[in-house]
Amino acid sequence: MVAKAAKAVSSLTEEQKEEFKEAFALFDKDGDGTISAKELVVVMRSIGLSPSVDEIQKMMDDIVPGNDGEIEFEGFMQLMALKLKETETEDELKEAFKSFDKAGKGFYTLDDLKAMVLQYGERMADDEIEKMFLEQDVNLNGQITFEEFVGIVRAKF
């Protein structure tokens, strides 16, 4: 997790780093260089992210094992970068899902998948497409929801 966090920080722009620095300073009211998990939730929400206190505490534990519920700026920057990356990935998944769910129904069917395969010029037999669909249809209801789609994508990558 720490390596992943460091990589996420390295992908931040200078503007994002400055924004995180200002947000941290704003919530470090006593100036001791640390903020609590509860304060961290408020900071994240102030920049458009929406984690729970439990999510933040778990992330803090992953970044700084044995922390006392407080985090320093370096750990804060890592958490913010990870959460931002997670949000970007979620947005990318939503866009990818929309390419299957063209009608905006909240799911796609075998026919939608067949149309998608044809649209991109892939040559696949119907039975291959059906097999692929059945592997994705976790609850076997004939519809792939966004949640099923995300599970499939995350399992593959």
Image (cartoon, rainbow, N blue to C red):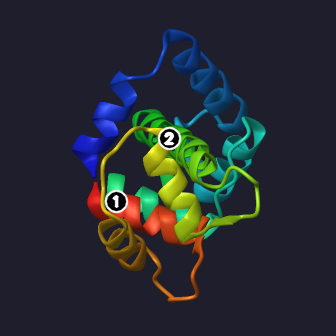
Q: Residues within 10 Å of mark 2 (few under 14, many from 20)?
A: few
Out of 141 and 87, give the one closest to the viewer: 141
Out of 62 and 153, give the one closest to the viewer: 153
- Residue 50 appears at what percent x and percent y? 70, 53
- Tell me: 63 left or right of 116: left
- Tell me: 128 left or right of 40: left
- Residue 46 appears at what percent x and percent y? 77, 39
**What residue is shown at x 69% (from left), y 41% (from top)?**
43
Q: Which residue is mark 2?
A: 119
Residue 93 in view of the camera:
yes
Residue 29 in view of the camera:
no
| 61 over 3 or under it: above or below | below
**What residue is shown at x 59% (from left), y 69% (from top)?**
109
Tell me the SS state at disc 2: helix
Out of 97 and 53, give the one closest to the viewer: 97
Q: Check residue 62 in the rendering and tell me which mark sits there, or answer none.
A: 1
**Three-letter amino acid code of the residue under disc 1:** Asp
- Residue 134 appears at what percent x and percent y? 40, 79
Tell me the SS state at disc 1: helix
Query: Residue most toward the left?
Result: 3
Query: Looking at the rendering, which quadrant does residue 75 occupy?
Result: top left
Mark 2 → mark 1, Cα distance in angstroms? 43 Å
- Residue 131 appears at what percent x and percent y? 33, 75
**What residue is shown at x 60% (from left), y 76% (from top)?**
143
Disc on the earlier residue, 2 or 1: 1
- Tell me: 59 left or right of 106: left
Please count the marks in the image: 2
Tag nearer the camera, 2 or 1: 2
**Three-letter amino acid code of the residue under disc 2:** Gln
Query: Residue most toward the top?
Result: 14
| 130 over 108 or under it: above or below | below
Circles 2 and 1, Cβ within 8 Å, touching? The answer is no
